[in-house]
Image (cartoon, rainbow, N blue to C red):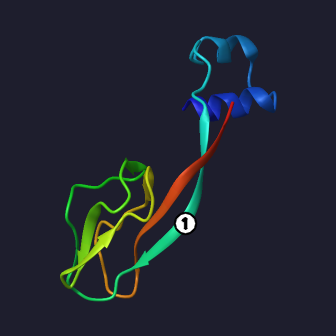
């Protein structure tokens, strides 16, 4: 909602008084840029995540096993590895997860 309200303000598409009663008084959070470093493709019907995963979750240590594909462990390739869009319904031939790292922050 805040993004839409800020867009309306930016393009002067809504009354400023109306917007000011609805916009958060706090500035928006700093945006972070994630570089995709690896795409994990599911090779078998026996792919599964070994730990609970969610989008934009960061796994701190390189070498952490977070999934298996037919019993083969899949590890994080670097420290502070960001899981981008992990598959909710893993299917052979599709992307299981994209991995990345934070490269910068913007205000």
Secondary structure category for the residue under label 1? strand
Q: Residue at x 54, y 32 (%)?
A: 1
Few, some or many residues within 10 Å of mark 1 (<14, 14–19, 20+): few
Q: Is residue 39 left or right of residue 29?
A: left
Q: Is residue 13 visible?
A: no
Name which residue lies at 23% across and 75% down: 68
Residue placed most toward the observer, 50 or 15: 50
Name the foreground residue: 96 vs 14: 96
Residue farthest right in this picture: 12
Corner quadrant of residue 2: top right
Q: Residue at x 51, y 59 (%)?
A: 100
Rendering coords of residue 57 (x, y %): 38, 49
Give coordinates of residue 67: x percent, y percent: 26, 69
In the rendered image, the quadrant that contains the C terminus is top right
Q: Nearer the viewer, residue 60 or 106?
A: 60
Against 85, residue 43 (above or below) is below
Provide residue 46's location: percent of width, then percent of height. 20, 83
- The vertical placement of 19 against 94, above or below, is above
Does residue 49 sit above or below 15 in this rendering? below
Q: Which residue is mark 1?
A: 37
User: Residue 67: in sight, yes or no?
Assistant: yes
Instruction: Identify which residue is drawn at 45% across, 54% down.
Output: 82
Direction from residue 18 to residue 73 in the image, left or right: left
Quadrant in which residue 86 is drawn: bottom left
Q: Is residue 75 above or below residue 3?
A: below
Marker count (numbered): 1
Q: Quadrant of residue 72?
A: bottom left
Residue 37 % position (x, y): 55, 66
């Amino acid at each position: 909602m805040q993004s839409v309200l800020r867009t309306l303000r930016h393009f002067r598409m809504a009354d400023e008084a109306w917007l000011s009663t609805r916009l958060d008084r706090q500035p928006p959070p700093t945006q972070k840029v994630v570089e995709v470093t690896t795409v994990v493709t599911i090779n078998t019907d026996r792919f599964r995540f070994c730990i609970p995963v969610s989008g934009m979750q960061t796994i701190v240590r390189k070498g952490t096993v977070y999934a298996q594909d037919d019993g083969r462990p899949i590890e994080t390739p670097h420290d502070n590895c960001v899981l981008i869009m992990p598959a909710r319904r893993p299917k052979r031939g599709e992307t299981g997860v994209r991995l990345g790292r934070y490269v910068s922050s913007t205000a």
